[in-house]
Image: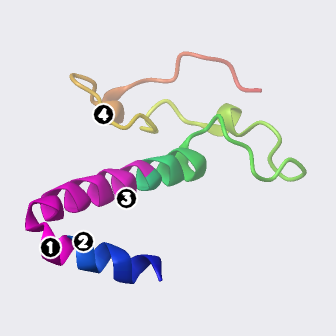
Amino acid sequence: TMLAIVRKQLRNHPALIPLFIFIGGGATMSLLYLARLGLRNPDVCWDRKNNPEPWNKLGPNDQYKFFTVNTDYSKLKKDRPDF
């Protein structure tokens, strides 16, 4: 099988082990980030019947960005109308 061939190559060339580790880690992190975007981003709508516009239900202190530099979301005030 393919895994047996890869295992044999790794035994013969141990310098390839870090390459497999870093490529596997990068692929895992990218898949986790895509899952986070699909599940936590307000632009993604999985249920159109019950919640057709999920971005309108966000409060002013809901943090949906992955990384913020100088913004404290708990202190923000509501500055937009209700829909």
Which of these two is toward me, 79 or 34? 34
Are the two marked residues, 1 and 4, in contact with CB atoms closer than 8 angstroms? no
Estimate the x, y position of residue 24 in percent, counting from the top left. 31, 60
Task: Give the mark nearer the N terminus: 4 vs 2.
Answer: 2
Residue drawn at (75%, 51%) of the image: 46
Tag 2–tag 3 contact (CB < 8 Å)? no
Give the mark, 3 or 1, whose residue is nearer the N terminus: 1
Evaluate if marks 2 and 1 touch, with contact meaning CB atoms under 8 Å apart. Answer: yes
First in sequence: mark 1 vs mark 4: 1
Residue placed under numbered mark 4 in the picture = 67
What is the spatial separation of the Cα atoms under label 2 and label 3, in whole angstroms?
A: 23 Å
Q: Secondary structure at mark 1?
A: helix
Q: Name the residue that disc number 2 marks.
A: 9
Mark 1: which amino acid?
Answer: Asn
Q: Earlier in the sequence, mark 2 or mark 3?
A: 2
Q: Which residues are magenta?
A: 10-30
Q: Position of residue 5 (x, y in %)?
A: 36, 77
The numbered mark at residue 12 is: 1
Residue displayed at 69% across by 32% down:
56
In the rendered image, which residue does mark 3 sit on?
Answer: 28
What crowding class fits label 3: few (fewer than 14 Cα within 10 Å), some (14-19), or many (20 or more)? few
Q: CA distance from mark 1 to mark 4?
A: 42 Å
**Numbered disc 3: secondary structure:** helix
Where does residue 11 sit, x and y in percent of width and height?
15, 77
**61 lies left or right of 49:** left
Residue farthest to the left? Answer: 15
Residue at left offset 20%, top offset 72%? 10
